[in-house]
Image (spheres, coloured by chain):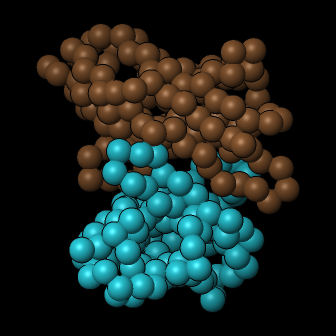
Amino acid sequence: GNSVTQMEGPVTLSEEAFLTINCTYTATGYPSLFWYVQYPGEGLQLLLKATKADDKGSNKGFEATYRKETTSFHLEKGSVQVSDSAVYFCALMRGGGSNYKLTFGKGTLLTVNP
Amino acid sequence: GAGVSQSPRYKVAKRGQDVALRCDPISGHVSLFWYQQALGQGPEFLTYFQNEAQLDKSGLPSDRFFAERPEGSVSTLKIQRTQQEDSAVYLCASSLDAAAGGYTFGSGTRLTVV
């Protein structure tokens, strides 16, 4: 079946540090890939997505590239801010027919200190 | 409304009690999803509606769980004879175009069964 494995947290960084959160997936066919972010006390928000191999999703300084050869979709940001502190979830959507459910990883808690 | 609204925000139920969780999606959003998020885990799919039709209920963990969306807008997730393992955050998400994967999530209902 479909599954997503992401980097165990928590991750603690200083402001302006470089961020990488690893995500790999297992799925049949060609899934769409997503990163969602959950700020404290809020619902999950779509951060970025990529729908086919070699696509790069980007938003708010975050980037992730859909790598089919390594089945990966690692999240990166060149310089994190305190306001980036949140839980980050990698997810896939298998798609096809009416199958639009998301399969999520366990989440990675990021804390950025000033 | 501007976002997906869920109520109540918190619910404490005694074991064996029935509970009903409400979701008000964004007006006009055709697709509606329910997810269950246990502590420290990623959300797990429960069920999916397109308008009033329940197209996928494969994630419902037992026949004690029931969801409905009778008029294609508000949805209710009902759990009968609650058990301790039902304790989790229940998330609702809606989407105008489910195939694009960009869902809007509510803040969730935290259910604690004592």
Q: Residue B98, percent across and down? A: 69, 56
The residue lying toward the viewer, choosing from B37 and A34, is B37
Above or below for A65 versus B66: above
Residue A28 found in image quarter: top right
Question: Residue at point 53% right, 78% down?
Answer: B65
Q: In which quarter of the image is the N terminus of chain B?
A: bottom left
Q: Residue B7, percent across and down? A: 35, 76
Taking the image as shown, residue B104 lies to the left or right of residue B29, namely left
Question: Residue at point 56% right, 67% down?
Answer: B61
Residue A26 found in image quarter: top right
Above or below for B20 versus B27: below
Question: Residue at point 83% right, 35% down?
Answer: A29
Chain B is which colour? cyan
Q: Quadrant of the C terminus of chain B?
A: bottom left
Chain letter of the brown region? A
Above or below for A1 versus B69: above
- Residue A22 visible in the shown view: yes
